[in-house]
Image (cartoon, helix red, strand yellow):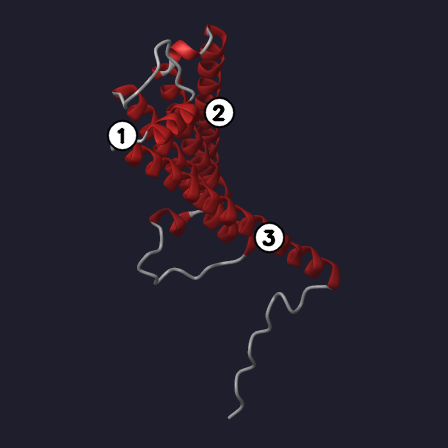
């Protein structure tokens, strides 16, 4: 009995130029590896700030001053101990780092899966839920939502520390945040229209 011929790979049948163009997607790999290194920098920064916060709790003036300089907190009288405002600003800064790290993960994992190569994580127990239906449109909406969250944290930090900012800075940060919000809504609405059109 003659065996069935194996189906030929589509990639093997490509002409040289299309094959080269298709293979050029691997040029994005160093970019994603660079983002992984950038995430490592954020992890290091997170732990430095957290250690400073814990040291300041136990009375370290050096750590307290490092926190004050890092968050840009200024008052007329010298600060000799932690207060609620400093703790809140530091915690918001830590949350900001975590949200940016989440954004990096979405770009690295989602971008690689969408634009470079499949990861074959379908049966992996730790596969992110959103990765199962990710595509370029979904990725844009998720990135827009993440940017709004990061912008919200920055705006909250600014309002808590409003005494150290001018009215012009407060106004422009608010305008930029609203612009991000409308941009994300426009992207989500466009994606909804495209999905509705494809379904029909």
The residue at 67%/68% (across/down) is 13
Which of the numbered marks, if any, corresponds to residue 30? 3
The residue at 26%/21% (across/down) is 83
Return the x and y of residue 91 as percentages of the image width and height: 31, 30
The residue at 39%/32% (across/down) is 96
Q: Nearer the viewer, mark 1 or mark 3?
A: 1
Q: Residue at label 1?
A: 59
* Left or right of 174 on screen, residue 21: right
Q: SS class of the residue under badge 1? A: loop
Disc 1 packing (10 Å; few <14; some 14–19; many ≥20)? some
Q: SS class of the residue under badge 2? A: helix
The residue at 37%/41% (across/down) is 47
Which callout, 1 or 3, points at the residue further toward the start of the chain? 3
Which of the numbered marks, if any, corresponds to residue 183? 2
Return the x and y of residue 85 as percentages of the image width and height: 29, 19
Disc 3 packing (10 Å; few <14; some 14–19; many ≥20)? few
Which residue is outermost to the top? 167
Q: Answer with the quarter of the image where residue 58 lies.
A: top left
Which callout, 1 or 2, points at the residue further toward the start of the chain? 1
Q: Nearer the viewer, mark 3 or mark 2?
A: 3
Return the x and y of residue 27 as percentages of the image width and height: 64, 53
Give the CA distance from mark 1 to mark 3.
44 Å
Give the CA distance from mark 1 to mark 2.
45 Å
* Left or right of 118 on screen, residue 126: left
Q: Nearer the viewer, mark 1 or mark 2?
A: 1
Which of the numbered marks, if any, corresponds to residue 165? none
Q: Classify the position of the C terminus by image quarter.
A: top left
Give the CA distance from mark 3 to mark 2.
29 Å
Q: Nearer the viewer, residue 112 or 164?
A: 164
């Amino acid at each position: 009995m003659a065996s069935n011929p194996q189906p030929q790979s589509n990639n093997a049948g490509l002409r040289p130029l299309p094959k080269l163009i298709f293979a050029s997607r691997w040029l994005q790999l160093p970019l994603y590896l660079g983002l992984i290194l950038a995430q490592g920098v954020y992890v290091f920064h997170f732990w430095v700030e957290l250690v400073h916060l814990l040291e300041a709790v136990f009375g370290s003036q050096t750590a307290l001053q490092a926190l004050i300089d890092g968050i840009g907190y200024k008052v007329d009288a010298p600060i000799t101990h932690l207060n609620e405002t400093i703790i809140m600003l530091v915690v918001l800064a830590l949350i900001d780092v975590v949200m940016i790290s989440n954004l990096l993960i979405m770009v690295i994992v989602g971008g690689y899966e969408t634009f470079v190569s499949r990861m074959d994580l379908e049966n992996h127990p730790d596969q992110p839920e959103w990765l199962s239906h990710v595509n370029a449109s979904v990725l844009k909406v998720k990135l827009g939502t993440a940017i709004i969250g990061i912008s919200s944290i920055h705006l909250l930090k600014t309002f808590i520390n409003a005494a150290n900012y001018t009215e012009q800075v407060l106004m422009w940060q608010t305008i930029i945040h609203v612009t991000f919000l409308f941009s994300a809504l426009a992207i989500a609405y466009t994606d909804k229209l495209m999905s509705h059109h494809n379904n029909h």
